[in-house]
Amino acid sequence: MNVITMGVHVLDVLVRPVEAIPDGQGATLVEDIRMTAAGTAGGTALTLAKLGASVRSAGAIGSDPTGDMLVQLLGAAGIDTRFLVRRTDTATSASVLPIRPNGDRPSLHLLGANITYGLDDVPWEAIAEATHLHLGGPELIGVETAERILSYAKEHGVVTSLDLLAPGMLGSFEQIASALPYVDHMLPNEDQVLGFTGEEDLMAGANKLLAAGAGLVAVTRGGDGALLVTEEGSERVPAFAVEVVDTTGCGDAFSAGFVRGTGLGRTPYDSAVLGCAAAALVAQGLGSDHGDFDLTAADAFAAAHKPRL
């Protein structure tokens, strides 16, 4: 499986546990501080590589130490970074994530170079040679740019998937609608479905995405697992019962598992099970890159662990 993960690449700085920010110039001791590659493209690339896919990342980052670290972390995970373009006038996107004891993760985020990615940066020949294109955060590069990239992929027989970055409250249907006819697998979370579609009911929101052209909508729902919606109907896929340390990267891990499953010829349901297993493995530690697992280990985990009912 030859995958290009295109779009949002972020360097995460995670601090755990954080119950409150000290007042003034106060200080508090924490158990762990880590840096990881992340983002709807970068984080997904990490888990795809663990699951045995050949992964190339494409996006925009800065020519700064943050960008150097991001490239180093991706490269160490076996990801080809040659299609990451380096900006000299814009910083690399980064987040500081104070992780709460229950695994929640408020974010302090710098958009950085992600919003500068454009058609002149796209590795068109590499897309045509790929088996799958995963586009993360199309709302940052503009729907016209996303539409052009995805339509080119479809013209060349490439399977496509799409994930969103913005919280649902910041989304609008116009930011994604014209790109949806070129999306085989839409992989948003529940808040994004409701926010981007303007619907109050999850099924209504998913069906609106289908009506606009998406082939399948796989909605992540945190501890409630995932909801698969197609024109034929819907299926619920339960999450696995694990002790959650940090939810950072869980949605990206689900996307990676789902994409890898479809690439292996698995059904959408079985692909979503692999996605839920990957998310559960990542959730048990700090950061998007947590877990020393491969496809065999993820499948074994899914077979051995009970779903959260």
Image (spheres, grey):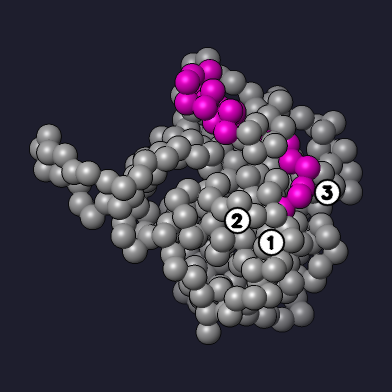
Asked if labels 2 and 3 touch by Cβ distance under 8 angstroms, the answer is no
Other residues around mark 1 within 10 Å, as few (<14) / some (14–19) / many (≥20): some
Q: Circle 3 — which element?
A: loop
> For mark 3, what is the residue?
1
Mark positioned earlier in the residue sequence (2 or 1): 2
Residue drawn 57% across and 53% down? 291
> For mark 1, what is the residue?
297
Q: Is residue 213 magenta?
A: no
Q: Circle 1 — which element?
A: helix
15 is higher (above) or lower (below) than 105: above
The kind of residue tagged 3 is Met
Residue drawn 58% across and 80% down? 306
Q: Which residues are magenta?
A: 51-73
Report whether 16 appears left or right of 304. Answer: left
Asked if labels 1 and 2 touch by Cβ distance under 8 angstroms, the answer is no
Name the image quarter holding residue 240: bottom right
Q: Is residue 63 magenta?
A: yes
Mark positioned earlier in the residue sequence (3 or 2): 3
Residue drawn 64% across and 55% down? 293
Q: Is residue 211 visible?
A: no
- Residue 138 image position (x, y, % from top left): 60, 45
Asked if labels 1 and 3 touch by Cβ distance under 8 angstroms, the answer is no
Quick one: 203 or 8, which is closer to the camera? 8
CA distance for labels 2 and 1: 14 Å
- Residue 170 image position (x, y, % from top left): 43, 52
Report whether 245 appears left or right of 206. Answer: left
Front label number (3 vs 1): 1
> For mark 2, what is the residue?
253
Front label number (2 vs 1): 1
